[in-house]
Amino acid sequence: MAGTIEVLVPGGEANPGPPLGPELGPTPVNVQDVVQEINDQTAAFDGMEVPVTVEYDDDGSFSISVGVPPTAELIKDEAGFETGSGEPQENFVADLSFDQVKKIAEQKSSDLLAYDTKNAAKEVVGTCTSLGVTIEGNNPREFKQRIDDGEYDDELTA
């Protein structure tokens, strides 16, 4: 491949403007074809920021690989809010169920440092802490302690 471009684009809504257009402009690829292919591949992540890698050759051919959106984006989408709390320890903006935390942990497992679902769930809970999101009505730090204490071992190791 002649080159690689890595960008974050809104799922299903990439366009030839920034950040993609300026990166692709000097390359031999057809920008509209790349944008269309990205939109087709990221449609399932509608509105979420999605990491995309475009590899291109000197002949104008290209391939696209789509990553998993950042954990915070998955949490925001799952809980239905736009921005995190300015005071995440005091003002909570949303609440997730245990099943939603597990779902996000499973979606992100390939991108996280965790080696199993239990630790992936703890990483998701950590992101909830910084966003101001409670889990089943509990402060995320208390919920993490419940995971550490083994309360969810059956569900997270199944």
Image (tube, rainbow, N blue to C red):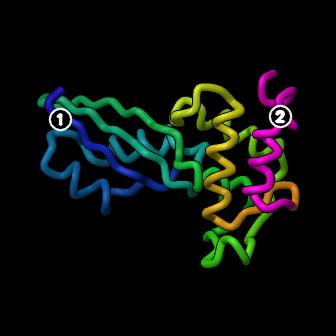
Which numbered dot is residue 150?
Answer: 2
At 17% across and 29% down in the image, what residue appears?
Answer: 57
Q: Residues within 10 Å of mark 2 (few under 14, many from 20)?
A: few
At 23% across and 29% down in the image, what residue appears?
Answer: 61
Residue 124 to residue 4: above or below:
below
- The percent coordinates of residue 12 (x first, y second) are 52, 50
Quarter holding the N terminus?
A: top left
Residue 93 to residue 77: above or below:
below
In-front residue for pair 25/53: 53
In-front residue for pair 30/94: 94
Is label 2 in a helix, a strand or a loop?
Answer: loop
Mark 1 or mark 2, earlier in chain: 1
Q: Residues within 10 Å of mark 1 (few under 14, many from 20)?
A: few
Quarter holding the C terminus?
A: top right
Disc 2 residue type (three-letter): Gly
**Residue 139 quadrant:** bottom right
- Give the number of marks: 2
- The percent coordinates of residue 16 (x first, y second) are 32, 57
Which numbered dot is residue 156?
Answer: none
**Does residue 33 belong to the magenta stretch?**
no
Q: Are marks 1 and 2 in contact (CB under 8 Å)?
A: no
Return the residue at label 1: 3
Q: CA distance from mark 1 to mark 2?
A: 47 Å
Is label 1 in a helix, a strand or a loop?
Answer: strand
Disc 1 residue type (three-letter): Gly
- The percent coordinates of residue 143 (x first, y second) are 80, 51
Residues in magenta? Answer: 138-158
**Residue 77 quadrant:** bottom right
Magenta-colored segment: predominant secondary structure: helix
Residue 98 to residue 112: above or below:
below
